[in-house]
Image (cartoon, rainbow, N blue to C red):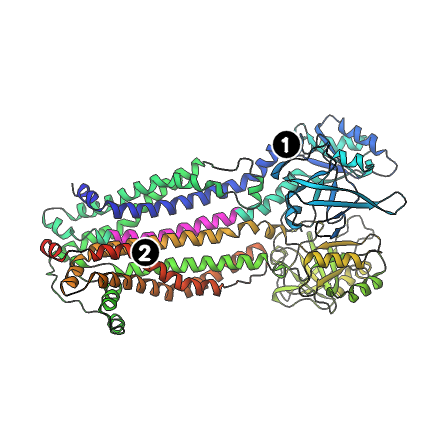
């Protein structure tokens, strides 16, 4: 009976709290469901697009490539195959930059199978090119993003004729941006390589004759990986054992999954952080609501309700709120589901849009109901236990305000300001008591979590815009086969080049542990990125990645035996003893994948000890002059080395695990917005509850002469002081917490943990929060101003 009575009179406050809990629960459930959806997106994409299972290329000398392709396609294990013909041309981008083949591979693989039946394209934007249209092409999404190409961009092509003279080919307009299995970057790999897909009509109209020796075969086996061993045996039996198999889909999927796992882990962290923040903030609101609803427990106890019945009444109130909140979890999660997956998984997701993860929704709904009830059990028991003490109190004892409240009240001459400050910090006693401490604590917690989210988001952006944090202290990797002195002179003379260092990558081993070593040396601007200890300088020094140091069971100051990893070399290289000087951030090798925190860093003298020949022919790691863009710098290098045969030029790109996080940059911002909404909702609930509980005090103020305007100002001052206190305490705690969280997350990513505090955003947030608090207080202030003293004082 009592519960029904309270439901009729207090349903608005209960509904408001239920909406906040349902919103937080639904957002948390969707973050968890999105993490699960993100984890499985790429394998489902490979299956939906009928992805290849292995790639065959590179036919040994003396073997007829065309005949070999036919023999491979006819093998009994081959269920489907598609041929790709690579064309050796250069691309002239709309910006005018000439891009060499090594950076922008061009293939004529719209041949009727590749991209249509096997390894099908998924159109991200635009449409598929018409195979009969010589002026149309499609481009993979990674290259489109990196080179700022989009639907409608026109790319021209140049190449070499049979006699070696330059030859101009036609132009092609990009009509679609596509994704297909095998294009997604793998963790630890540079994302510098891409592909433009031309049409057979382009090949015919330009007189291009693809060479079978450069053909790639995409193959799908009848029984999947189970047929791989039999396929290799048939290759050997056909005399094709020397054919290269550079890509196996299982291996590539596992590497891509490691990249996508970073995104799913970010969503799991988001779900956990949101759940903890909502539990802490809304748990305070639930406790406050339980306290406010307990004003009449002493009277109910005098009428005969036992302490257990009083406690059960509080639990049942929470149950009503929990049921209403639980009903909102599934609709909110489903409505938010189009926001996930995120990152690379969003491009791979075969079925974007609304999704229902029944397991997550059921667990989320039950959790919201149980946690809502659990958060109210202790406050309900406490309220029931103190009901008798309240009943014995006359309520006439005078409350002694704190010294701080009294000092703040005297700081303003305005009676409205003094009243509002006391309402913010002075709980009162008896029937008009308000749990102001929990209100201030909840607001402070909201500000702290919001500040932590802003710091995390700012650090996210700082990482994406600062290649140095991923280990890159250069802008371009330049290799020439010969004439190193002439190439160095050309680079030094270019005003668009700030400098260069000699360095590169080498494959080494520590015992059975295979590593990629980055080599840097000389006075150039490119330096090793060290997180702990010192960079290697001498020939007997090495720095290791954090994961490599753990795997090798070593530490700074100890020694390891480093050996050149060169399979098949005779005699085998001898191990070289080196002292570990520090922990390094090793950037990805453009030619292979490396794991997070893996690798080694060497000085040039160190490489000379293990591989003297490579040390004499190190590439150039070039830094552009200040103000020179990436396109302008690469174009300058290409012009400087135009006369050098086989010059290899590739831009320093973010590692795939960092590049895949670019689309996650908005997640911390979205979290900040959601936390701000929860904080604003709890403040509105606090003010509304406070006005209802203190209507007796407001009636007295109006009887003493307060005008409606002064009552509104008093409520505004109450909201302002709660918000100001929350900002004063919560901002430093949130900034410190955000910095700590980012350092922990960056260590997992294998990048330099350098948090960034958005001082401008925080300075703007302070007046914005105060203005928002007063805006939220407007409705409760109007309700307070309409208080009728005679009616309230007569009934109470």
Q: CA distance from mark 2 to mark 1?
A: 54 Å
**Residue 482 covered by magenta stretch:** no
Report the mark closest to the observer, 2 or 1: 2
The residue that mark 1 highlights is 50
Q: Quadrant of residue 281?
A: bottom left
Along the viewing direction, whichever of 428 and 413 lies nearer the viewer: 413
Q: Callout 2: helix, strand or loop?
A: helix
Kindly identify the residue that appears in the image at 59 percent across and 47 percent down: 259
The residue that mark 2 highlights is 776
Q: For the magenta stretch, what is the residue range?
A: 264-289
Kindly identify the residue that appears in the image at 19 percent across and 58 percent down: 694
**Where does the C terminus fall, quadrant-wise?**
bottom left
Q: Which mark is residue 306?
A: none
Along the viewing direction, whichever of 325 and 420 lies nearer the viewer: 420
Q: Quadrant of residue 309?
A: top left
User: Is residue 152 placed above or below 296 in the rendered structure?
Assistant: above
- Report whether residue 476 is seen: no
């Amino acid at each position: 009976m009592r519960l029904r009575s309270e439901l009729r009179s207090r349903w608005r406050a209960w509904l408001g709290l239920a909406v906040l809990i349902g919103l937080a629960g639904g957002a948390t459930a969707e973050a968890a469901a999105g993490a699960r959806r993100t984890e499985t997106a790429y394998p489902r994409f490979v299956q939906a697009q009928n992805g290849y299972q292995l790639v065959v290329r590179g036919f040994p000398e003396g073997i007829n490539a065309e005949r070999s392709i036919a023999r491979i396609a006819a093998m009994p294990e081959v269920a489907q195959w598609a041929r790709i013909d690579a064309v050796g041309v250069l691309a002239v981008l709309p910006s005018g930059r000439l891009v060499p083949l090594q950076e922008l591979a061009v293939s004529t693989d719209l041949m009727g199978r590749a991209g249509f039946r096997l390894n099908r394209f998924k159109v991200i934007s635009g449409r598929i090119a018409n195979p009969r249209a010589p002026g149309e092409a499609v481009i993979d999404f990674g290259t489109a993003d990196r080179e700022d190409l989009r639907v409608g961009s026109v790319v021209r092509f140049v190449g070499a004729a049979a006699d070696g003279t330059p030859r101009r080919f036609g132009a092609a307009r990009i009509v679609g941006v596509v994704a297909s299995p095998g294009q997604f970057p793998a963790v630890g790999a540079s994302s510098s390589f891409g592909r433009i897909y031309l049409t057979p009509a382009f090949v015919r109209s330009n007189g291009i004759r693809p060479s079978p020796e450069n053909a790639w075969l995409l193959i799908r086996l009848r029984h999947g990986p189970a047929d791989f061993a039999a396929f290799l045996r048939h290759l050997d039996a056909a005399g094709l054992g020397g054919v290269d198999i550079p890509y196996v889909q299982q291996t590539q999927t596992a590497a891509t999954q490691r990249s996508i796992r970073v995104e799913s882990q970010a969503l799991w962290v988001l779900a956990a952080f949101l759940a903890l923040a909502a539990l802490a903030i809304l748990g305070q609101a639930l406790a406050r609501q339980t306290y406010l609803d307990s004003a009449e427990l002493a009277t109910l106890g005098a009428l005969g309700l036992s302490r257990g019945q009083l406690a059960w009444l509080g639990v049942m109130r929470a149950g009503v709120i929990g049921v209403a909140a639980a009903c909102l979890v599934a609709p909110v999660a489903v409505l938010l589901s189009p926001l996930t997956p995120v990152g690379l998984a969003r491009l791979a997701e075969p079925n974007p849009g609304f999704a229902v993860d029944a397991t997550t929704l059921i667990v989320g709904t039950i959790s919201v109901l149980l946690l809502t009830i659990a958060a109210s059990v202790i406050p309900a028991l406490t309220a029931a236990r103190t009901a008798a003490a309240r009943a014995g109190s006359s309520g006439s004892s005078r409350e002694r305000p704190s010294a701080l409240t009294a000092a703040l009240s005297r700081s303003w001459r305005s009676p409205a300001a003094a009243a509002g400050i006391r309402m913010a910090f002075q709980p009162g006693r008896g029937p008009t008591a308000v749990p102001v401490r929990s209100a201030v604590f909840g607001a402070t917690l909201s500000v702290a979590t919001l500040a932590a989210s802003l710091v995390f988001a700012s650090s996210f952006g700082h990482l994406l815009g600062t290649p140095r944090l991923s280990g890159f202290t250069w802008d371009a990797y330049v290799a020439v086969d010969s004439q190193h002195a002439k190439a160095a002179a050309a680079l030094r003379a270019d005003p668009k080049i700030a400098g260069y260092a000699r360095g590169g990558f080498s494959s080494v081993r520590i015992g059975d542990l295979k590593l990629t070593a980055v080599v840097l040396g000389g006075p150039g601007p490119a330096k090793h990125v060290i997180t702990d200890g010192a960079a290697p300088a001498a020939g007997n020094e090495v720095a290791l990645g954090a994961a490599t140091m753990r795997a090798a069971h070593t530490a700074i100051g100890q020694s390891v035996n480093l050996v050149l990893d060169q399979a098949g070399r005779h005699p085998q290289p001898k191990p070289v003893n080196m002292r570990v000087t520090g922990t390094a951030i090793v950037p990805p090798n453009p030619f292979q994948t490396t794991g997070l925190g893996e690798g080694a860093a060497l000085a040039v003298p160190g490489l000379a000890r293990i591989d003297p020949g490579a040390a004499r022919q190190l590439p150039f790691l070039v830094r552009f002059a200040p103000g020179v863009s990436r396109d302008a710098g690469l174009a300058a290098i290409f012009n400087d080395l135009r006369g050098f045969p086989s010059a290899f030029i590739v831009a320093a790109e973010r590692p795939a695990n960092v590049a895949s996080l670019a689309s996650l940059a908005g997640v911390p911002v979205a979290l900040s917005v959601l936390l701000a909404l929860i904080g604003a909702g709890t403040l509105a609930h606090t003010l509304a509850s406070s006005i209802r509980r203190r209507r007796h005090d407001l009636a007295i103020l109006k009887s003493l002469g307060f005008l409606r305007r002064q009552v509104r100002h008093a409520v505004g001052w109450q909201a302002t002081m709660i918000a100001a206190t929350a900002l004063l305490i919560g901002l430093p705690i949130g900034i410190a917490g955000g910095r700590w969280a980012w350092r922990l997350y960056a260590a997992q990513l294998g990048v330099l943990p350098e948090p960034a505090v958005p001082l401008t955003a925080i300075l703007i947030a302070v007046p914005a929060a105060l203005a928002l608090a007063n805006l939220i207080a407007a409705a409760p202030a109007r309700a307070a101003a309409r208080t009728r003293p005679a009616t309230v004082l007569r009934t109470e």
